[in-house]
Image (cartoon, rainbow, N blue to C red):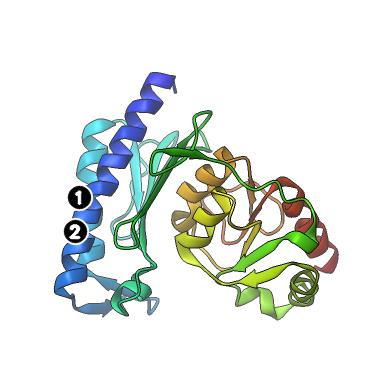
Amino acid sequence: MSELDLSKALAAARDAADAAGVVLRHYWRKGVAVELKSDDTPVTAADREAELAIREILHKALPQASIYGEEFGRDDSNQDLMWLVDPLDGTKSFVRRTPFFSTQIALMHRGELVLGVSSAPVYGETMWASAGGGAWFDGERVRVAATDEMAKASISTGNIKTLTRDARWNALGEMIRDSNRIRGYGDFCHYHLLARGGLDLVIESDVNILDIAALAVIVREAGGVFTDIHGAALTLDTVSVLAGTPAIHAQALNRLTISH
């Protein structure tokens, strides 16, 4: 994509996230009925209406791109240019009146994630990034910390049920003992903190690409490293995350790989 095209796409993604925020804030104040999907995860009218609002804006701005959305599925009309959309990442938090939910919008071009917008309308944070354009937090450019020693590192975990089933659980325990501190911010929050220097490593073993695609662009453009837990590049099938400052990511990957 040309720089001009990427700039236009980023502007559309930010507009779409703002539109979703209007929907989410409405239902946050009003309340909303909860249904269960076939996989027993919750869904609400807020999820669906927010995605429809996003799709309308994205399609108008970039009609040649396909859209892969959490609620309305995947349109494979253009596999070279695809929007990845989670209108309400953190529905469980939303329905329990916890403000740790967000809208995630990313664009994948020929298999590479090239832009991302992460908007948490009730929490009050928005971050965005595009390839080569840096990572931005409410209009200010941000970078990951310079942390290069595990003894000084702050680690945050999210969904890690799968990780508890094998030797990597012990490796994580050792990292926690060797680190400066452990937290469990989860969802968008720990990736935002990582991108702006507040954390040094994020580990998750149970995610969906729609949860993390935008956040991956943001962390990378902030100077961090963002892979799956095995160190592999992200794809549409990615289900885990290892993200951190370059030095801490490398040390964590070595520990987790040796133990697996």
Compared across the picture, whether 144 is left or right of 34 comes to right
Residue carrying label 1: 53
Up the image or down, 114 lies above or below 190; here it is above
The percent coordinates of residue 25 (x first, y second) are 21, 62
Disc 1 marks which amino acid? Ala
Q: Residue at x 42, y 42 (%)?
A: 128
Q: Are marks 1 and 2 in contact (CB under 8 Å)?
A: yes
Neighbor class of circle 2 (other Cα within 10 Å; few <14, some 14-19, many 20+) is many
Disc 2 marks which amino acid? Val
Residue carrying label 2: 23
Neighbor class of circle 1 (other Cα within 10 Å; few <14, some 14-19, many 20+) is many
The percent coordinates of residue 176 (x first, y second) are 74, 72
Give the structural element (helix, strand or loop) at label 2.
helix
Q: Residue at x 51, y 44 (%)?
A: 218
Compared across the picture, whether 70 is left or right of 192 comes to left
| Mark whose residue sits in front, 1 or 2 | 2
The percent coordinates of residue 233 (x first, y second) are 64, 46
